[in-house]
C-alpha cells in the first residue's frame, strides 16, 4: 500500500475528530492522539487497515500502528522502529485500560469505527446495485 494513502487517512482522521469532538475538548485531535489517545488512533487505523499491527513503544508510554512494514502515529511515519514491538494480547488489554482515561467517555474509537463500517457497507451496497 502506498504511504500517501495511509497519510491521507491520518489527516482525514484528525479533521474528523476535530470536527466531531472539538467542542468537548480543549486540545486538537493531534494533541489528543499523542497524549493518551494513541491507542484510540491505533484502533481506528487498524479498522481501516485490518492488516495493520498495533505496536507498543518499549517504554510502554506510546503506541502506533504498523502497516506494510511502516510504523505510524498521528504525526505520520515513525522512523525509530527499533523502539517499538508488536503488542501482545495482554498489552492490548493493558492499553485499553490505561491509555486515554480522560477521553474514554467520548468513545472515539468505537464511534469512528462504526462510521467506517457504515461507509464500507454503503460502498458495498452501491457496487452491488451497479452490478445489476
Image (cartoon, rainbow, N blue to C red):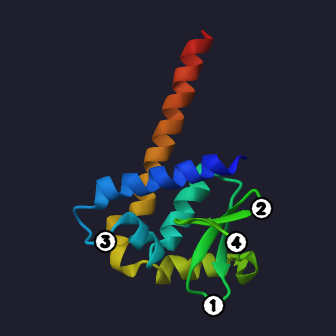
Look at mark 3 in the image and give the residue it sits on.
27
Q: Considering only order in the chain, which callout, 3 or 1, is on the residue closer to the N terminus? A: 3
Tell whether 98 sits left or right of 131.
left
User: Could you say where residue 60 lies in the image, as x and y percent from the top left?
Assistant: 60, 87
Residue occupied by mark 2: 69
Give the crowd class for mark 3: few <14, some 14-19, many >=20 residues within 10 Å: some
Horizontal and vertical percent for residue 92?
A: 61, 76
Which residue lies most toward the bottom here? 59
Looking at the image, which is closer to me, 82 or 65? 82
Secondary structure of the residue carrying numbered label 4: loop
Q: Is residue 64 left or right of residue 115?
A: right
Q: Is residue 110 above or below residue 34?
A: above
Q: Residues within 10 Å of mark 1 (few under 14, many from 20)?
A: few
Q: CA distance from mark 1 to mark 2?
A: 21 Å
Instruction: Please give the name of the residue rendered at 70% of the width and 72% of the height, measured from the top-left corner.
Output: 79
Residue under label 1, please give it.
59
Question: Of the residues under marks 2 and 4, which one precedes in the sequence?
Answer: 2
Amino acid at each position: 500500500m502506498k504511504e500517501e494513502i495511509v497519510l491521507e487517512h491520518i489527516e482525514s482522521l484528525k479533521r474528523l475528530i476535530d470536527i466531531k469532538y472539538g467542542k468537548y475538548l480543549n486540545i486538537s485531535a493531534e494533541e489528543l492522539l499523542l497524549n493518551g489517545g494513541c491507542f484510540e488512533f491505533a484502533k481506528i487505523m487498524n479498522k481501516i487497515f485490518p492488516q495493520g499491527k498495533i505496536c507498543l513503544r518499549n517504554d510502554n508510554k506510546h503506541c502506533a500502528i504498523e502497516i506494510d512494514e511502516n510504523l505510524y502515529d498521528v504525526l505520520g511515519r515513525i522512523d525509530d522502529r527499533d523502539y517499538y514491538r508488536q503488542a501482545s494480547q495482554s498489552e492490548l488489554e493493558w492499553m485499553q485500560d490505561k491509555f486515554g482515561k480522560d477521553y474514554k467517555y467520548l468513545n472515539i474509537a468505537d464511534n469512528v469505527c462504526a462510521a467506517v463500517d457504515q461507509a464500507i457497507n454503503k460502498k458495498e451496497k452501491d457496487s452491488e446495485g451497479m452490478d445489476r
